[in-house]
Image (tube, coloured by chain):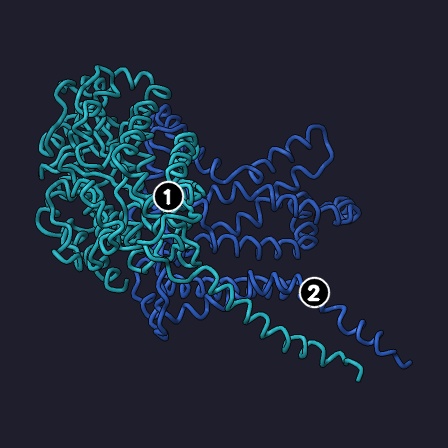
Amino acid sequence: MPISRGTLPRKAVGAAVPVVLAALTLTACGGGGGGTSADGKVAGDISFQTWNLRANYKDYFNGLIAQFEKEYPDVRVKWIDQPADHYADKLSADAAGGTMPDVVNVSPDLAYPLARAGVLTNLDKEPASAKYRGEYTPEAWQANEMPGLNGGYAFPWYLNTGPLFYNKALFAQAGLDPDRPPKTYDELFADADAMARHSGGKVATLAATPAIEDFGRYGVRLMNADASEFTYNEPKGVELLNRYKQLYTSGGLDSTALTNGPEESGQKFLEQKVAMNPGSAHDLSNFKENAPTLYKNLGITDAPNNTGHPNMYVMGLGISSTSRHKAAAIAFAHFVTDKRNQESFAHKVAIFPSTKGSLDEPYWTRDDGTDEGRVRVAAARMLKGAVNYTPVVMSDEMKTVLQNQVALALQGKKSPKQALDDAVAQSDRLLKQS
Amino acid sequence: MRQSRGAATHWAASPWLFLLPGLAVIAVFNLYPFLATVWQSFTDARTLLPGHWVGLRNFQDMLHDDQFWTALRNSALYVALVVPCTVLLPLLLALLVQPRVRFVGFFRAAFYTPVVASVVVVALIWNWMLDDRGLINGILHALGAGPVPFLGNGWLLLFSAMALTVWKGLGYYMIIYLAALANVPRELHEAASVDGAGAVRRFLSITVPSVRSTMVLVGALSSVAAFKVFSEVFLMAGPTGGPAGQDTTLVMLVERTGTGLSGRVGYASALSLVVFVITLVLMLLVLRAGRGEGER
């Protein structure tokens, strides 16, 4: 029978459907599969994903991998580095596609949704990884413990904390003592007010609205005990926002603060349009290179806090729960984050190790007289007892909710109390939906 | 004429075989994502968690979401204010650079340059210029005025982003108009001039009717682009959408709610569906208006 015009497509479709379904089924299953035992032999090919580190530390990581492969000849490590932007989207695509690298660089807020989706291994439940827990500072390990998920989901890697940089020349111009920067929130708000008055509103002291970690440092309770509800609308939170509102009105807070991100705030400080900005030891070389006048007048002080516990940022290495060579992945993640290798990495870049006792080493306790040394020692001192204030359950959308409500309060469109109540209500609703 | 079996087979299968690569691409990259978006808009799916059927709940939530109404207002305003500018100004610009006079090539290239410039770079430059201590406010200060909070006030920020969109699109639509103007018979203008018609009269009675279909095309293209605006506002207002999210557009809201590891994919899909329907209606209205004009 000749094939008619009408029957061919129908037949073709009929034949194609099972093929397409088979292909879809195969692709859907291809990346998944359960992970292997973590107690097995340390062998196999594993992938290791970092977050924007290849550009500056290629040789370090290649050396590290070569060293590991020498110690474990049955393991081959494939290093993947992702750009800084859209890292969370890359992780979500990998996780959804079942192609998560065996060892992956995560911060606690990225680890939480991955852990909740069952994509990361609970390190406390695997004897092969749980045995290493004691090597890290308790604060660093706890930073990767997820509420409701009973365990740590990433090996603590490097830490950072921010000193507060200030412009001594702008302080002097405002009649403030450049050698006595504010140490407490009361002093900070008083100095900012003076700066705004003396400069006729031309020089602001800060360029960013308060974020969740600012509420934490101020001593506001951010969440309830089981992390099921936000509580930063308590009276202390309202008090902080009231003070920021006064600051905004007086010109002590830059007029573009409502939309500024960390980069914009940093740029304002670099251009000497604001007098203070939180930063890290990374920024020193930037100041030296791009703003030599500022660098000459640069002051460094501790970020004020009312709790005695500064804020810290934690990076970690998570293990994919579907890793085919989990034993090798755990061995490698531990190798990268062990005391020797963390300290060695922290000598190359202005970060801080999370292993016990590392911050007592002379490199982090003795001021060598250089600016870098001064910042390093000050930051290392702050890190002892520092905590990660940002709740891991707080998604980017919840952070935006807070920022927008704070902006409404600063603009006078809502009272600080109402703004924080609304932010908490919206964030709680998002939390319950998640 | 009776065809042989082989010939018939060849004749029937060939079009489909030729179409297959294109259809496969459309199916994988257009049709499947579209159908998946429609499906997900009725679920509570999140980035890493499968969704459950929730019926119309996402759409009901939208009605009570202040950010949605703010975003809808901003996207609609973008269309209302940007489209007339992108329909008319490039036409005037095209008329200006149409005559073949000395240095006209330079001006054509200059007007087209913003089109090829990266929107990120351009937005950064505009941000620097519009900053409280930037070039524009510097000039205003020298004149004894300002500073104007272009980047600190939600409305001014939105209008600044609109100005950027118009400025960046002028060259693109100008090229389209130049092509259309080349087809307008010169004799019509000459005859009108002989009859005593001035430049404005000739523009209204000859140029505009002659390029009406192109104006409709530009209107349709720029309406869709304006309603789906993202880059300019995102880059100028920041990821939060300006002070208190006041400048958020619909596509920005889709991006904000649907991306990241905790993204609300179901809700973002419902928002995307709303954007799709409104865009479709908008385009049909513009095309219908154009057809109505043409039939008159």
Q: Residue at x 43, y 43 (%)?
A: A77
Which of B172 and A368 lies nearest the eye of the viewer? A368
The answer to whether residue A244 is above or below residue A122 is: above
Tag 1: Cα neighbours inside 10 Å, few (<14), some, or many (≥20)? many
Disc 2 is placed on an element classified as helix
Residue B19: assigned label: 2
Q: Is residue A227 visible?
A: yes
Outermost residue, bottom direction?
A1
Q: Is residue B285 left or right of residue A96?
A: right
x 67%, y 66%: residue = B295
Quarter of the image for the C terminus of chain A: give it.
Answer: bottom left
Horizontal relation, residue A412 to residue B88: left or right: left
Amino acid identity at mark 2: Leu
- Report x, y in % for residue A298: 24, 20
> Image quadrant of residue A94?
bottom left
Place of residue A205 in the rendered image (x, y in percent of width and height, measured from the top left): 21, 29
B289 above or below B188? below
Q: Residue at x 70, y 65 (%)?
A: B19
Q: Earlier in the sequence, mark 2 or mark 1?
A: 2
Provide residue B81's location: percent of width, then percent of height: 47, 51
Q: Which mark is residue B237?
A: 1
The color chain B is rendered in: blue
Secondary structure type for disc 1: helix
Q: Position of residue B253 (x, y in %)?
A: 38, 55
Q: Is residue B92 left or right of residue B38?
A: right
User: Do dots 2 and 1 share one subunit?
Assistant: yes
Label 2 crowd (10 A; few <14 / some 14-19 / many >=20):
few
The type of residue carrying mark 1 is Ala
- Seen in the picture, residue A179 relative to B6 is either above or below; the reply is above
Please give the letter of the chain rendered in cyan: A
Of the 4 image quadrants, the one containing the N terminus of chain A is bottom right
